[in-house]
Every structure is written in C-alpha cells, then in structure tokens.
Amino acid sequence: MKLWGGRFTKEENQLVHSFNESLSFDRRFYAQDIKGSIAHVTMLAKVGILTDSERDQIIEGLNGIKADIDSEKLAFNDAEDIHSFVEAELIDRIGDVGKKLHTGRSRNDQVALDMRLYVRDEIDELLPLIKDLQKELLQLMEANIDTYMPGFTHLQKAQPVTLAHHLGAYFEMFSRDYQRLEDNRKRMNYCPLGAGALAGTTYPLDRELTASLLDFYGPTLNSMDSVSDRDYSLELLSDLSICMMHLSRFCEEIIMWNSNEYRFIELDDSYSTGSSIMPQKKNPDIAELIRGKSGRVYGALVSLMTTMKGLPLAYNKDMQEDKEGVFDAIDTAKGCLALFTGMLKSITVNKANMEASAKNGFTNATDAADWLVKNGVPFRDAHGIIGTLVLTCIERDISLDELPLEEYKKISPVFTEEIYEAIKMKTCVDKRNTIGAPGRDAMEKVIAIYKEKLN
Ligand code: ARG
C-alpha cells in the first residue's frame, strides 16, 4: 500500500519501486520510528486532536508491532519505507483509528526525528566502547611506567620515553574522540517533530511536550532547517573518521612493534592469523583490518558531504542517501573499537627489547649534550662534541654508555665519571618531569588524573 496513492492513476513501475524504496535499510530504526509515533500521539491526545481512547488504541497497536518485529514474528514486506510499513501495519491491526496516526506530521519531520533518535542511541553505545578502550590503556600504562623505549621522530630513534608515555598519547586522542561525540550529542539533541513537511502545521501541536517525551532539550526552532539538515550525521561521521584515524595509527604501530624487526610486543595467538603457504607466519590481520577499515568510514563522510552540498532547502529525496553510510560507519567503528580493546588486552610487552632498542639508538645523546651544558659548555659546542662521540660509537658498534671515559676526555676535558649516570636510560626519562613528560613523577600525576576522569 502506498501512502500517497490518491493522486495517482497508474501503478508504480517495479524498477522505480526498488530504486526508490528505503525499507531494506531504514528498517534498522523501526524502534525509534515507533517510539517517535508514540510520543506524537500522546501529544495529539493532550492537545485534543485525538481522544484518549484513540491514543490508547494506537499506542497498543504500535507496541504490538514493535514486539512482533523484535521477535521476528512480523516480517518486513515491500512497503516503501519504515514509516509506510508501520502505518500500514497499524491500520491493518486496529482499523480506521490507525489512519489518524499521521495527523499533523510528515515523513520529512518523521525521518528527521528517527535518524536523530538513532544517531543519539548509537552515540550512547559508542561512548562506553571508547571508555573500555581507555580503561585497558590505563592498565597497560600503569604496568609500564618504567618500560623504557625509544621515542621516534621521522621514524628515527630520537629520545627515550616509556611505553606508558607512548600509550598516554593515545589515551589523550581517545579522550578527545569521546568529547567530540558528547559534544555532537548535545548539539543535536533538539526535536524536529512538528516541523511537518517544511513549514510546520496548522494543528495546535505541543512541540515542547513531544520534545520532552523523547528526552530532547526542546524543539528545534526552524521547521525548514529541521527537515533539511543532516549535519549531526556528518558530525558523527567526522567524529568516527577521526577516531578511526587514531585507531589506524595505533594499529600501524602495533604491526611494527609486533614485527620481527622490532619485537617490542607480541600479539596473542587468538588475535593473529596464519598463512596458507608459509608455515612460520603469524600475521597481525586484526590490526591491519582495523587500519584498513578506516577508509570506509572516511568514505561515508565524503559521500554524505557530497550528497548534501548542492541541495536547495528544504527536503529532497537525495537525503535518503544519508542512511547506509552512517549505518556502515557506526557498525565499523563499534566493531573496530571492541576488537582493538580485546587485542590490546592480549599483547605481551617485551620490556627488555624495548629498552635495548632505546639504548642502541643514541636516544640519550641530547642528555649527554645537556650534561655538558650544565658543566659550562655552550649548547652548540656540546652538540658538536656529542656528535663526534656518536660517530666514534657507530664505528665501534657500541652505545654512549659503553664508551670509555678516555675517549670522552679526548674530545673534551670537561667530561668526568658523572656522565655515565647522566645518560642512563632511567635518568634520561626520570629527569623529564614537567607535566606531560615521560618522567615517573609526571607520569604518575597524569595517570591519577586519567583514573579520576574514567570514574
Ligand atoms: N525514506 C525517506 C528518507 O529517508 C523518508 C522521507 C520521505 N519523504 C518524502 N517527501 N518522500 O528520506
């Protein structure tokens, strides 16, 4: 049954129907659609457009439909979209009273409402997934305050940090991802129902009431905007794209750290896969897939941006294209967050290899130069002196820690035995104690802040 058959004399072409329909995907928010309809009729009765008995019959019918879809007793048919499906089914079940459901409403404000409710619900599921990931990260951080490792710039060993510090960088990124989603939730939390097709309605609707019944802060303030923008979906896609980018970078590092060249960590067998031909292989497929899936989330963002960019106000059917990309991006991000957390839980940290790598990469060269500065040598000269010593070490294949004092003294008489204490990994890290740095005291303060944040 078509909602709009009255004005038409011919049947719809079958290809047109399949091209135009959205039930195959918008069925996903049937629960939100029904919830919105219940709020709508509750309000209609309150303002005297429906009797209490009509309201009750409609609500009972809608609840029955919801229960039957939940339990798969009611199957979807070839209705045009979820709104038509529910309305037709309601009329089927309760007769003429059901025909009053759509009073003072258009599918334009209805779909705007459904999508908002859906996005809002999904944000509420995404937030705890990010939090779980952060909890896992925090545990790893606490366990690795003294796990020294090279910090890199240009993928060249630069200065020593700790694994806790490195992971803390991701903790920060995920905190912002969390806040972005929360911000979006706040910004979008206004109710478009009552906007009608585009120009409101002549019925005395109580929009404040529907808004509050559906836990919105209030009604939206411009009916044309209400039915024609999808910026909350775009924000969600943008938030998810950024979050996926963070996951993807983290995965890239996990893949490197897990490689034979680094051996910083080892992924658990349960999060790795094998090769069909090479018996020795244990591949980080999960990390690679998460890295790869960031592409489809960005794709959804670019796709919807492009769909929206040329649309005149108000509703246009192009906007039906707002759904599948958003659904896919949400599924992808949720799956990736959950799997990533599981994978993180399963890693074994190879502390010795990390520390050895920090040592053999001259990551303490800056500290050696700084020691000279503290002993009266101008920084530019100190830089040159240590550079020369690094060259000597490279020739001999040893670290600065292993270079004998005579060699140091040959280049500068300022050096004493104290240099060795100054360039120890522990000293290099623990002296970096301004807030945000990897030193133990600084790190402990930050971890305490994170702990409080998470609770
Ligand atoms: N399936 C449609 C969509 O998703 C519902 C709104 C239909 N409105 C209309 N004027 N045809 O956008």
Image (tube, grey):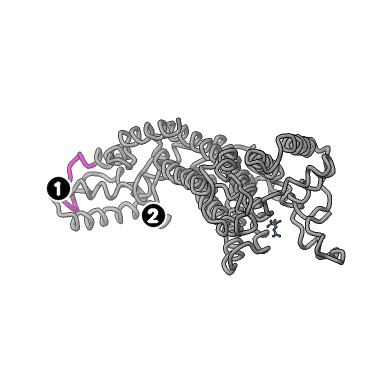
Residue denoted by label 1: 414
Can you give x and y, in whole percent of width and height, for residue 115 in the image?
63, 50
The stretch drawn in magenta includes residue 66? no
The numbered disc on residue 233 is: none
Amino acid at pointer 1:
Val
Can you give x and y, in whole percent of width and height, for residue 108 in the image?
66, 56
Q: Is residue 350 above or below residue 201?
A: above
Instruction: Please give the range of residues in magenta.
Output: 410-419
For the N terminus, the image quarter is bottom right
Left or right: residue 167 versus residue 286 is left
The stretch drawn in magenta includes residue 417? yes
Residue denoted by label 2: 153
**Of 111 and 251, the residue lying toward us:** 111
**Of 135 and 84, the residue lying toward us:** 84
Amino acid at pointer 2:
Thr
Ligand 1 within 8 angstroms of badge 2 C-beta: no
Left or right: residue 69 versus residue 365 is right
Q: Secondary structure at mark 1?
A: loop
